[in-house]
Image: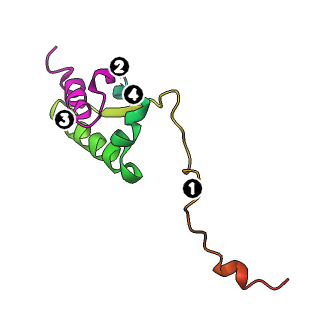
């Protein structure tokens, strides 16, 4: 049994050391015919730490989990649950943001 959840323990270890609220990190593990699915639940404030810039941190965690799974002859996938209260999409523009109007000036009305 210790080998079967090594991937889950590894995920918890890595994520708890990345986030600001390690006590809120929860994982679940399900096994089906397609392999192992690890589901990660975190504090909404920590979503940026786990995803990373352009998803690089999440992709790195997934790559490491695939390596851990390969050592145990299992296919491991990671699902990061989007917490309630998190926002998706681009950030709203701030009042300080500079707006490029060079293309507007070239228009002839």
Q: Residue at x 27, y 26 (%)?
A: 22
Picture layout, residue 84 above or below residue 96: above
Closer to the chain start, of discs 1 and 2, is 2
Tell me where residue 18 sits by quadrant.
top left
* Disc 2: which residue: 30
Please identify the quadrant where the N terminus is shown: top left
Q: Nearer the observer, disc 4 or disc 1? A: 1
According to the image, label 4 marks what residue?
43
Looking at the rendered structure, the secondary structure element under dot 3 is helix
Count neighbours of disc 1 (C-alpha within 10 A) and say few if under 14, some if 14 to 19, many if 20 or more: few
**Front label number (3 vs 4):** 4
Dot 2: element: strand
Dot 3 surroundings within 10 Å: few (below 14), some, or many (20 or more)?
some
Instruction: Tell me where residue 61 appears, x and y as whole percent.
Output: 28, 41
State yes or no: residue 13 in magenta: yes
- Residue at which label 3 appears: 68
Marks 3 and 1, how far apart at CA: 43 Å
């Amino acid at each position: 049994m210790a080998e079967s959840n090594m991937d889950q323990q590894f995920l918890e270890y890595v994520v708890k050391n990345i986030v600001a609220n390690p006590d809120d990190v929860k994982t679940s593990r399900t096994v089906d015919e397609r392999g192992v699915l690890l589901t990660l639940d975190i504090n909404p404030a920590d979503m940026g730490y786990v995803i990373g810039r352009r998803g690089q941190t999440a992709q790195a965690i997934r790559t490491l989990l695939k390596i851990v799974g390969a050592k145990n002859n299992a296919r491991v996938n990671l699902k990061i649950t989007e917490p309630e209260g998190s926002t998706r999409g681009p950030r709203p523009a701030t009042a300080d943001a500079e707006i490029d109007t060079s293309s507007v000036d070239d228009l002839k009305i």
